[in-house]
Amino acid sequence: MGTDELESKWKELVEVLNNLNGARKDLKQWKSFFAEWKSKLLNKAREHRTSLFQTGGSGFINKELSDIENRLMRVIGWISVIGCAMLPDEINPDAPE
């Protein structure tokens, strides 16, 4: 998807969202809202996953995701939370080839 097409889709989404009951925002505000939501959701998903592997000693932290959060995670991809064993931990762009 090219830049122009992506921007067009964003404008289409803004129009749909602003026609619903609730907050009205311009394009920049909606982009910021979704970026912040995504960031918070990824942190919450990481905390939830971490709490599943903790042993006793500390209280259980309920960080279960809501239905809408689970739907968004399916769009984003859980790989961003759980990682991929086939990828190196870190890539140094300045390393000699």
Image (cartoon, rainbow, N blue to C red):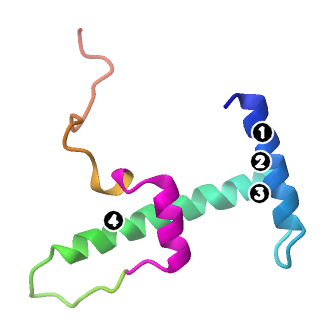
Against 53, residue 97 (above or below) is above
Asked if disc 3 and disc 2 are in contact, CB closer than 8 Å, the reply is no
Callout 2 crowding tier (Cα within 10 Å): few <14, some 14–19, many ≥20 = some
Type of the residue with mark 1: Glu
**Which range of residues does the magenta coloring cover?**
64-79
Asked if disc 1 and disc 2 are in contact, CB closer than 8 Å, the reply is yes
Q: Earlier in the sequence, mark 3 or mark 1?
A: 1
Q: Image check: 92 left or right of 36?
A: left
Q: Which of label 3 and label 2 is nearer to you? A: 2
Callout 1 crowding tier (Cα within 10 Å): few <14, some 14–19, many ≥20 = few
Q: Is residue 71 magenta?
A: yes
Q: Can you identify the residue that label 1 sits on?
A: 7
Type of the residue with mark 3: Gln
Q: Which mark is residue 46?
A: 4
Q: Earlier in the sequence, mark 4 or mark 3?
A: 3
Q: Which of label 4 and label 1 is nearer to you? A: 1
Q: Earlier in the sequence, mark 4 or mark 1?
A: 1
Q: Main secondary structure of the magenta part?
A: helix
Callout 4 crowding tier (Cα within 10 Å): few <14, some 14–19, many ≥20 = some
Q: Residue furthest bottom?
A: 59
Against 33, residue 2 (above or below) is above
Q: Which mark is residue 29?
A: 3
Q: Is residue 53 magenta?
A: no
Type of the residue with mark 2: Trp
Q: CA distance from mark 4 to mark 3?
A: 26 Å
Q: Position of residue 59 (x, y in %)?
A: 21, 91
Q: CA distance from mark 3 to mark 2?
A: 11 Å
Q: Secondary structure at mark 3?
A: helix
Q: CA distance from mark 4 to mark 2?
A: 28 Å
